Image (cartoon, rainbow, N blue to C red):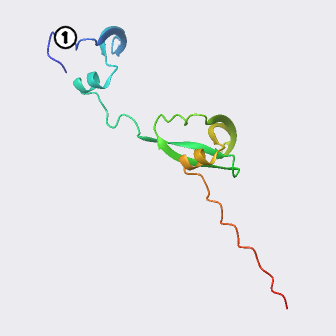
Amino acid sequence: MVEAGHTPLAGTEIMQVPIETADGTIMTDAIVVDNEAEADYYGVLDSPTAPATQEVLICNALNGECSEVTVEAGHTGIEGTEFMQIPVETEEGVVMRDAIVVDTVEEAQYYGVHDEPAAPAAPVEEEEY
């Protein structure tokens, strides 16, 4: 509810939208909010607006394994990182998914999918009898 004769915020768009009534569908003016400040002003802002993180599929070319990794929402891969479509088996069958392919130790470490190599075993010295 707004006061009678309400003037929308500066920059707020007004458009005609269809509204269904008991007498049929009529066109009426509507205020279109397209940013957080306008939505907050009119009390139609839902919180939270978006998740802070998302799951991405990382395929590690160094060890041949793929895994889901949590990154910030809207993540773009680090410079030089390759993206590709890979088949993933789901309950509904095989689907193609976007995956970030890491092929350097630095990229694998950045995404937390780097397995530290085991320390080389000390050479076994044979004793002479």
Please state, as top left, top right, bottom left or bottom right, where the C terminus lies in the image.
Answer: bottom right
Residue, far right = 129
Disc 1 on helix, strand or loop?
Answer: loop
In the rendered image of this protein, does residue 71 appear above or below residue 63? above
Residue located beneath label 1 in the image: 7
Tell me how many marks there are. 1
Query: Which quadrant would the N terminus be assigned to in this image?
Result: top left
* Residue 111 in view of the camera: no
Instruction: Tell whether 6 sits left or right of 44.
Output: left
The residue depicted at 64 percent of the width and 37 percent of the height is 97
Estimate how packed mark 1 is, as few (under 14), some (14 to 19) or many (20 or more) residues with alpha carbons within 10 Å: few
Along the line of sight, the residue nearer the viewer: 129 or 110? 129
Q: Residue 13 location in percent, x, y?
A: 31, 11
Q: Residue at x 68, y 43 (%)?
A: 88
- Residue 21, given in percent of the width and then of the height, sits at 33, 15
* Res 59 seen here: yes
Residue positioned 65% across, 60% down in the render: 117
